[in-house]
Structures are given as C-alpha cells and as structure tokens.
Amino acid sequence: MYRQVGLVPERDSVYAFLTGQQFVLSTAKLHELTDPAGAAARAIALLDMAEAADRKIATYSKGMRQRIKVAAALVHDPEVLLLDEPFNGMDPRQRLHMMDLLDKLGSEGRTILFSSHILEEVERLSGTIQVVVAGRLAASGDFRAIRRLMTSRPHVFTVRSSDDRLLASTLIGGTLIGGTLTGRPAVTAVELTRAGLQVRTSDYGAFCRDIAVMARDHGIRLREVLPADESLESVFAYLVAD
Amino acid sequence: MFNTTVAWITLRATLSRRRALLFALPAAVLILLTAALKATRPPMLPWPSHVLGTFGFSVLIPLTALIIGTSVLGAEIDDGSIVHLLATPVRRSAVVMTKFVVATGLTVVFAAVPE
C-alpha cells in the first residue's frame, strides 16, 4: 500500500541533520526504487528545491521544509498523495507554486487529498470537499454543492443607500412580483435599522448583481453593500451548530 | 531484516545530536577513575579488576546501553519524524531489527572498547 501513497505529515518533523538531497534520496532508497538518485533529482527539481538541496534541513525555512517533505512524498511517483496542512508557513509565492503543482499533479490523474483550515485555499483547489466537524463528516461534495447547501440559511447583507426606505420596498416588491423568473434577487427579509438595511437573501450571486440594477433603475445611490456574515464561515457555523 | 538506509539514518541521527557526547561520558569517567587510582595507589593491589569488574560491568555498560537504546528510536518517535520512515514499504520488524543492531554496535564502541 505504501507504494501507492505519498504522505506529507503536518508536523515539521524531518531529519534536520540531513541535507534536503540526502533526505529525498534516502526516502527513494527506502522505497527500493531502481534508480533512487534519478528519482530524487526529479522530485527535487519538481519542487524547485535544487538550489537548497545541499543545505541541511535544519537551516530551511518552514515553507522549504514543506516542499522538501512533498518532494520526498513524490519520489516514488505515488498515485495518491496525502497532505496535512500543506500550505502552513509558506509565503504567498510558494503557496501559488504549490497550488499550481497540486493542480498539475491532479490533472495528471493523481488523487490528492489535503486538509486545510483556510477555506479560500480549499475553494481554489477544490474538487470534492469533505467538512469534518468534531471527528464526524458533516458535508461532502463539490464546493458549489456545499454552497447550495448554504442557501437554506439566508445570507445577510448590510446595505446603506441614499434612500433606504425606497430600496427596501423595491427589494421586497421585486420578489413578490417577479420571483426568480424576472431575475429579481431572492430576498426573504428586509429590516430597516438606523445603520442601514439588513437584507436576508437566499441567493448570494443574484442579489449582488440585481441590487445594483435595481438601484440604478430607481435612482437610488448605493453607499455600501456588505456581506454581514462571511458566506463560507457561516456554512461552517451552520454545520457546527447542527 | 537489515536495512542499510535505516541504519545510516539512525547512525546519523544518533551521532549528530549533542547527546552523542553523553554516550562517551561514562567511558570517560571510567578512564579518568582508572588513571587517578593508578596515580595514587601502589600498583600491586588488584584494583584494575575491581574497577573494571564492579564499576565497569555493572554500571557503565548498562548505563551506556540505556542511553543509546532509548535514543536510537525514542527521539524519532518523540519528534514525529518516524512517520517518514513508516510511510515507506520497509517492514516494521526490519526497522526494529536495524535499530537494535545499530544500538548494539554503538554500545560496543562507547562502552566495551574503552574497557
């Protein structure tokens, strides 16, 4: 089984006394590859670590350690790559490089499973997302599917404009008359507060598009349209609360 | 049953830590003790066999073996780097056997040879 799986553990524990090259090479040898030196060189080049390969891992930055761990995990060309928090400690450039690499490996037909707390990363690299809450699988699927799941819980926007009252009646009116057929935002509730309007909608994207059109048609100036609850976070809160 | 790569990593791990100095400490104490006794005592008493037999064999070898034995595998488990080793197709029994051989070899070098 270990021949098909490459593992990148989250903990920063590597053999710090070895150089990057020695580490990857010894992993290649442990996998009993026919050409360990060649495989090690290929994996190191793939992760863009050739320059630092002769330095001891103890001198590496956190991002470099992550990369050398990925190089070691890829050395035997596994079909499945498991990564635990692979973007920890990486600078933005390294992060992009790693994302591109994972994308590439994925499109080559490998299965890549990684964990992350940063939802934007998950969304970008997406595929199938598994949401685990307290050790139990809470949601699973393509990220759009999870987003759709989210719509059972309305999105809350804070809107400030030149004429809050008119905007409120327009928003409500729009849903009553046209519904989704006319492309009007699916507004479920509007609340007039001193700070502006609190609008609840079940369709994030349609609301954002349509409120601008509506405001223009009615001569209302929009001063602020803010999502009051961060969408991906709210799905998490929703799932955790369940 | 014996994996040279595992042996090499273990050897590097054990000897590159500052702990390696600790292995030599009991042996150094023994040598110093012998030298000191030799300087103060007349040479006709049977002290060398006493020092070697009682102190050397009953204290020094077990102590050195203990320090080395715990460090060949323990340190790796403690800091989690053992995962890299276990995620390869090397058999666990081969890992243990190799570590055992390395530990025995190191004990011989650090304890038996000075005696």
Image (spheres, rainbow, N blue to C red):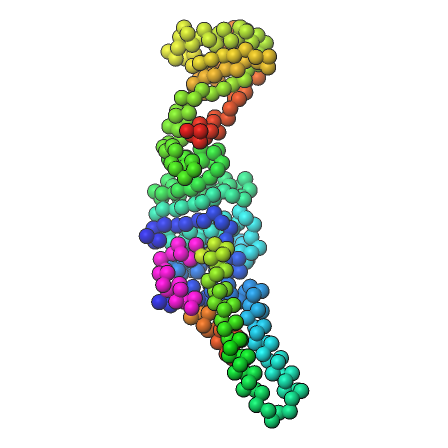
Q: Is residue A54 above or below residue A84?
A: below
Given residues A128 and A91, the one toward you in this image is: A128
> What is the number of callouts on the image?
0
Given residues A69 and B66, the one toward you in this image is: B66
Is residue A13 inside the magenta stretch?
Answer: no
Given residues B70 and A19, the one toward you in this image is: B70
Residue lying furthest right: B40
| Quadrant hosting residue B93 | bottom left
Q: Is residue A10 visible?
A: yes
Residue appearing at x 35%, y 67% in the figure:
B1
Residue appearing at x 34%, y 50% in the figure:
A4
Residue appearing at x 34%, y 53% in the figure:
A3
Instruction: Residue B77: give x, y in percent of width and height.
Output: 47, 57
Residue lying furthest left: A1
| Quadrant hosting residue A204 | top left
Q: Is residue A227 above or below residue B3?
A: above
| Quadrant hosting residue A30 | bottom left
Location of the C terminus of chain A by quadrant is: top left
Residue appearing at x 36%, y 43% in the figure:
A111
Dominant secondary-structure state across the stretch colored magenta: helix
User: What span is colored magenta in the figure?
Assistant: B83-100
Q: Is residue B45 left or right of residue A104?
A: right
Q: Is residue B109 visible?
A: no
Instruction: Residue A181: give x, y in percent of width and height.
Output: 37, 11
Is residue B93 inside the magenta stretch?
Answer: yes
Instruction: Residue B95: give x, y in percent of width and height.
Output: 40, 63
Q: Is residue A104 above or below residue B10?
A: above
